[in-house]
Image (cartoon, grey):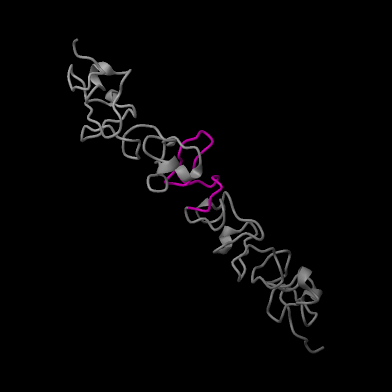
Amino acid sequence: SGPSCTDGILNQGEADVDCGGPCTPIRTCEIGQHCNVSTDCTSGICNSSNQCDGPSCSDGILNQGEADVDCGGPCAPGKTCEIGQHCNVSTDCTSGTCNSSNQCDGPSCTDGILNQGEADVDCGGPCTPIRTCEIGQHCNVSTDCTSGICNSTNQCDGPSCSDGILNQGEADIDCGGPCAPGKTCEIGQHCNVSTDCTGGICNSTNQCDGMCCL
């Protein structure tokens, strides 16, 4: 009888014995067998050495649960996907950001990730002044904070009478106003009323003054 795909002979343009070529798609070649084109192979992968190959992270095919061709999924973290490529989870992406459209995206102030020099997640650093950090969040400088106060433990803090800032209606820095009588202002400091001053005298130029002779 004539050549066939079951005669145990490499003939009739087969890629390997009784597989590929005219025998496809009924009889395709297995991993390690010779191939000429990807359709010769059961795996669909004919490598550069003309051998049927298994799925890999460098075969140029979207397979094995990859997020995009040869990246993400089982290929991560060795081969992560770049901006604009498809992703399923943030770890699929080199940037660490998989947006709501399932595309790898660049760092932003709304990605829920501490990146791009932010003081805390999505606030401070390059996100200021649009997105500043709230009380209790990490900060590096006062401008990271909505309150304008970054304390000595690098946390955004609320106004106080010991923060070194003129705020909360104080007469001068950390004295008078709501800080009095616990912390009153000394001679030469600004005052609004006499109770702002340690000496009890707020002169006509709104400075705490010392006692003077009658």
Side of 30 where 14 appears, left or right: left
Above or below 45: residue 136: below
| Residue 94 belongs to the span the image colors magenta | yes
Q: In which quadrant of the rendered image does the C terminus lie?
A: bottom right
The percent position of residue 135, horizontal first and vertical second, equals 67, 59
Residue 41: name its quadrant: top left
Residue located at (66% from left, 64% from top): 157
- 61 or 110, nearer to the observer: 61
Residue with the most extreme top position: 1
Above or below 199: residue 7: above
Figure disc tally: 0
Side of 101 where 156 appears, left or right: right
Residue located at (39% from left, 40% from top): 71
Above or below 160: residue 56: above
- 60 or 51, nearer to the observer: 51
The percent position of residue 158, horizontal first and vertical second, equals 69, 63
Q: In which quadrant of the rendered image does the N terminus lie?
A: top left
| Residue 130 belongs to the span the image colors magenta | no
The percent position of residue 126, horizontal first and vertical second, equals 50, 53
Residue located at (32% from left, 34% from top): 60
The percent position of residue 77, horizontal first and vertical second, equals 42, 48
Residue 4: name its quadrant: top left
Magenta stretch: dominant secondary structure? loop
Residues drawn in magenta: 93-115
Side of 20 where 170 appears, left or right: right
Residue 119: name its quadrant: bottom right
Residue with the most extreme bottom position: 213
